[in-house]
Image (cartoon, rainbow, N blue to C red):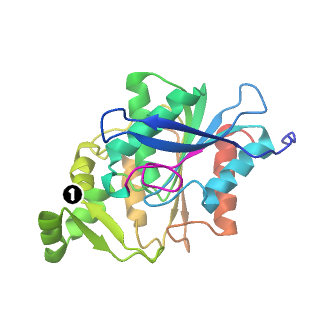
Amino acid sequence: MSELYAISPPETKSITVGSAAGHGREIAILYRPASKPGSPVLVWLGGYRSDMAGTKAEEMDAFAARNGLGAIRFDYSGHGASGGEFRDGTISRWLEEAVAVLAALKPEQVVLVGSSMGGWIALRLVQELRQRGGPKVAGLVLVAPAPDFTSELIEPHLTATERASLSEKGYFEEYSEYSPEPNIYTRALIEDGRVNRVLTGIIETGCPVHILQGMKDPDVPYQHALKLVEFLPADDVVLTLIRDGDHRLSRPQDIEKLLAAIGAITHYD
């Protein structure tokens, strides 16, 4: 049974990433220091056009507060409370920001919780931390993960009109079920996605991985999660398929599964 800790609002912080002219951007952070010494810090890595104030991110933070864990949430540039233009965003750029946030806050060990595109960034972040050094990654919780989505889920299905728009305008627009504004995919995002692919060989995370995937996800087919598991042969991997789950997995029953996965990896419940 978990001990109870007083719940207070997280600290508001910001850092500047990128010092070159025209590349600096202010990254907004919500940071909850651990109440229990030595406990892991949960790190939220959001999806494409999502922000740190979403339901799953808030629930992760509340779980951390209840259990004395640390929690880090931040918005990528062009998202939420952070600066920068969304159209300038690439996987490399958002990954750089994730690395910078951890370097600034200096947690000793982290559990990365990545949603959709955030699952891709979580996997790349593990690779970067192994090369650069940094906090120990104690576990991964991936919600409807979308690694390599630009090359695996977008490029193969581009229409002639979308290809022409990419060539002529440098981007194309796509209807979004989640916003009145269309999704925008740039040529830079797609080209950068190719150099950040992870589904090319064995992914060594060195930690337990729990994947939650809806089988009625219209954006990331559940077969994509099955494919990801094939590239994680050396790790302790749990895949939970939710038969009636959509892409967001934000219903109460989905949140319950998310928190159970985090609890199993952190040994808090």
Query: Vertical placement of 262 versus 163: above or below?
Result: above
- Judged left or right of residue 71, residue 164 is left
142 or 87, nearer to the observer: 87
* Closer to us: 203 or 143: 143
Element type at marker 1? helix
Residue ID for mark 1: 187
Q: Is residue 73 left or right of residue 203?
A: right
- Which residue does the image show at 52% across and 71% down from the upper left? 246
- Give the percent coordinates (x, y) of residue 149: 33, 57
Region rendered in magenta: 73-85
The majority secondary structure of the magenta stretch comes to loop
Closer to us: 75 or 223: 75
Q: Amino acid at mark 1?
A: Arg
In the rendered image of this protein, does residue 186 appear above or below residue 129? below
> Is residue 98 one of those drawn in magenta?
no
Picture coordinates of residue 88, whole percent (x, y): 31, 52
Residue depicted at 23% across the width and 70% down the height:
157
Q: Measured from the top left, where is residue 103 in percent x and y?
A: 50, 27
Residue 224 lies in what quarter of the image? bottom left
Q: How many marks?
A: 1
Instruction: Check the picture and name the quadrant holding the N terminus.
Output: top right
Q: Is residue 205 visible?
A: no
Neighbor class of circle 1 (other Cα within 10 Å; few <14, some 14-19, many 20+) is some
Extreme residue toward the top, this view: 133
Q: Is residue 75 magenta?
A: yes
* Residue 93 in view: yes
Q: As displayed, is residue 268 above or below residue 60?
A: above
| Occupied quadrant, residue 219 | bottom left
Give the residue at the far front of this rendering: 21
* Left or right side of 266 for 9: right
x and y percentages locating residue 7 in the rendered image: 82, 45
